Amino acid sequence: MENIPAYREISIGSANLIRRGKVRDMFDLGDKILMAASDRISAFDVVLPNAIPSKGRVLNSLSAYWFGKTEKVIENHLITDDVDEYPLQLTEEEKEMLSGRSMLVKKGEMIEVECVVRGYIDGSGWRSYEQSGNLFDIPLPEGLKQGARLPEPLFTPTTKAQSGHDEYISFQEVRDLIGTELANLLKSKSIELYEYAFGEVHEKGLILADTKFEFTMIDGKVVLADEIFTPDSSRYWDRETYKPGGPQPSFDKQYIRDWLDLQDWDKTPPAPVLPDDVVQKSVEKYVEVYRRVTGRDIA
């Protein structure tokens, strides 16, 4: 991916920066927000020194693609991802920087629950099953292998940690936190979204193993927000190579995590610099999942 610029930070002269997250830079536009996906990458809750060229474009463009696809399931916060429609005075350099990696969205009040849906057992869910035979507090059949498909998609919400790891909370705790009616709606819509996308990508030779959603309240309505079905929020596997019984090759930053695990690093800042071949391989994985999901090359 030579000659493709990588943006560790997004800066706009005519907009006020609200915050820089692990990946996204947020700008306040009154009753709207401009979200821009940088090429930063984090692992083990630490932002790495390298940027991954095209990563922000993949995340933003995939989210825009899925927001359009899932409008029939639930309303989302996207207004436009066309930089020419942003209510800002932008320089040509800023337009080039924002093109493909930003979107104008409605401002709302985030619901403080990460809505995770798992169709297969892996990651922290697998570790829980190994220890207890349950998926956290949800009973599962005996004898499941790592990466096995679950009998049905399961809702395993977590806290929304401002720093550190999100922590699993039971569905009853979600009800206590936000009320039964809202909790039931988030659960049903999360599972419906997962099942819709699972069917879409299955036909394209991919497995959507698990994913997570965030929702916001806008004018008293629950609205889908942040990102959706990106490699940073979802675990995509290849149907052709899928074989339960161990870790599955995935189209996300697992390749980077695996490299970091081999280093003499205590998982606290500063993180080691990634070698060029690890960066290149990561770019290829992000770009490939975009192409396979959308049928298009990233612009």
Image: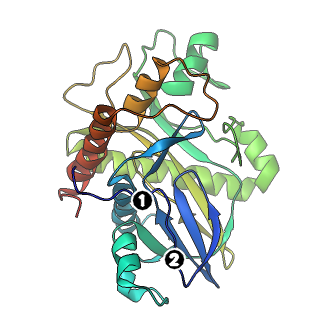
Residue toward you, 120 or 180: 120
Which mark is first along the chain, 1 or 2? 1
The residue identified by callout 1 is 7
Query: Label 2 is placed on what type of residue?
Result: Ile
Q: How many marks?
A: 2
Can the viewer see residue 82? no
Where residue 199 appears, x then y in whole percent? 30, 47
Where residue 9 appears, x then y in whole percent? 50, 61
- Residue 59 horizontal side relative to residue 162, left or right: left
Report which quarter residue 5 is drawn in: bottom left
Disc number placed over residue 203 in the picture, else none: none
Which residue corresponds to the image point at 33% horizontal and 52% vertical from the top-left? 53
Q: Residues within 10 Å of mark 2 (few under 14, many from 20)?
A: some
Which residue corresponds to the image point at 21% horizontal and 48% vertical from the top-left? 292
Mark 2 to mark 1 CA distance (whole Å): 13 Å
Query: Label 1 is placed on what type of residue?
Result: Tyr
Report which quarter residue 28 is drawn in: bottom right
Q: Is residue 142 above or below residue 279?
A: above
- Residue 216 horizontal side relative to residue 264, left or right: right
Which residue corresponds to the image point at 57% horizontal and 18% vertical from the top-left? 127
- Residue 284 horizontal side relative to residue 222, left or right: left
Check disc 1 and report its element: helix, strand or loop. Answer: loop
The residue identified by callout 2 is 12
Q: Residues within 10 Å of mark 1 (few under 14, many from 20)?
A: some
Which residue corresponds to the image point at 67% horizontal and 39% vertical from the top-left? 166
Q: Is residue 253 above or below residue 24?
A: above
- Image color mode: rainbow
Check disc 2 and report its element: helix, strand or loop. Answer: loop
Residue toward you, 201 or 164: 164
Tag 2 and tag 1, C-beta contact below 8 Å: no
